[in-house]
Every structure is written in structure tokens, then in C-alpha cells.
Image (spheres, helix red, strand yellow):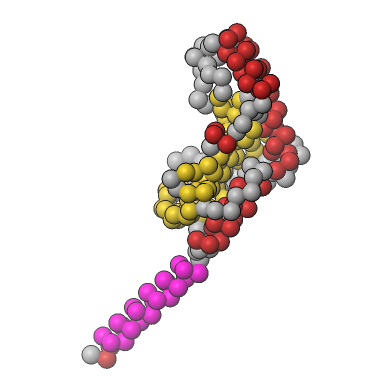
Amino acid sequence: MKRKIFLLLAIILLLSLAMTACKQGDIGEAKAKEIALDNINRVFQTNQTEASVTREQMGCYPEQRGAMATTGDGELAARWLYIVDVPSIDKANYQAYVVASTGEVLFLSQSESNIILTDEQEEQAAALLAAEPDYGREHEKTFTLLKDACREWAVANLGDEHPILLDAARGRRLGAPARESYSVDYYVVTKDARVYCITMYWPSLQVLNINVENPK
């Protein structure tokens, strides 16, 4: 009987320690909100103060290091994230994903509705679409402008004077119908072996999304 009581107490103690460890390993909702707002305000040059926070579990490859992940790079596991919507989940003008255990920011985005084009940019976009209603050579020139803008942003914000940029070529096909405004993705590799996918927006040449492809 004493042995059973001892085992029961030992199990309760282990569960208690495990729950305490999990709690200590979580940055908490308030800290996640603070981290998200700091990053959103810095990256998108805004001054947001309100946000709603939810906690969700997502799949990840925790063993990946310094390269794009493939299904062979590690065992698929689960990671708890704080999803921070600014100002609220019903009206998300900005969004951030923050890792609950470390505070690392995996994803930042802003809504296209945040971007206000100048008259010159609107005229530029309309003229391009009128001259070339399908993606073609003239649109390829804008992809180069977007890539240059992405490089400038990366140098200014990612701590690397010579990042490697690769055109992700996602979301468009030459000869496909074009729009006045559109986005283009670029992979950015920095000297610390971090890989980002950065979405640039035409014609404002602004960043829409930043996704960390190989989180720690």
C-alpha cells in the first residue's frame, strides 16, 4: 500500500514538474504581443498599439539548420505559435507569428489595403497594364525593380551588406493575365545562413510579407 502511494506521489510530482517546465518554456501572450508589435512597427514603419492574440499548434521541421527544409531534413514535429493580429482577428491590417517557446518571429505581413499609392504610381501601373495586358518583357522590368527594392530592404533590415537574392517565381506566369498591382516573391539568404521569403508589392515597391523559411 505504501509503495502504491509512493508511486502515485511520484507520478503527481513528475506531472507537476512537467507542467511547470512547459509553462516556464512559454513566453506568454503579453510578451508575444509586445514582440509582434515591435517588429510590425519597425518593419512596416507604423505605430500600432492594439492587437489580439491566439495560440495555435503548427507542424515544423525543428532539426533544419542553414538550408531550405525538405522532408528529409528532420522529423515533422509540432510547434506552438502565438498568432498576433493587429488590431484584431476580425480586422487584421497586420499579422505576426511568434514561436511560443523562444519568441522568434517566423512571419510578418501587412494587408494590401494599408498601401496608399501616389498619383504617379497609379499612372505608372495603369500605363503598364494598358501597354501589356499579359505578363511579358515590360513586366519583367518591374520584377527587376522589385528585386532591387527587396535587396535594399534586406541590407537595411537583415544585418547583411551582401545578401543573396533568388527570384522565387511564384504566383505568376509569363503570358498570363496581369493586374495593375501585384506581388512578387524573392528568397533572401543572409551570411548567417538564414533563409527568408520576402513578398514585394508593385507599384509601391514595398514589403508585404516576410516569412522565415528555416527557423531556429
Splitting the image into 4 quarters, where does residue 143 fall? top right
- Indicate yes or no whether the magenta region holds residue 124: no
Residue 106 x/y as whole percent: 55, 47
Q: Residue furthest right?
A: 161
Where is residue 93 drawn, in percent x and y?
A: 53, 42
Instruction: Classify residue 214 by image quadrant.
Output: top right
Residue 179 visible in this rendered orientation of the protein: yes
Q: Nearer the viewer, residue 206 or 194?
A: 206
Q: Residue furthest bottom?
A: 2
Q: Specify the farthest residue to the left.
A: 1
Quadrant (top left, top right, bottom left, bottom right) of the N terminus? bottom left
Say which of 93 and 167 sits in front. 93
Question: Which segment is the magenta one?
Answer: 4-24
The residue shown at (27%, 91%) is 2
Residue 102 appearing in the image: no
In this view, which residue lies farthest toward the front?
Answer: 119
Q: Indicate yes or no whether the magenta region holds residue 20.
A: yes
Q: Residue at x 34, y 78 (%)?
A: 11
Give the main secondary structure, helix, strand or loop, of the magenta stretch.
helix
Report the residue at 56% width, 23% height from top: 181
Does 176 sit above or below residue 89? Answer: above
Q: Residue 77: x and y, percent? A: 42, 52
User: Which residue occupies the foreground of this view, 67 or 173?
Assistant: 173
In percent of the image, x 37 and y 74: which residue is there?
15
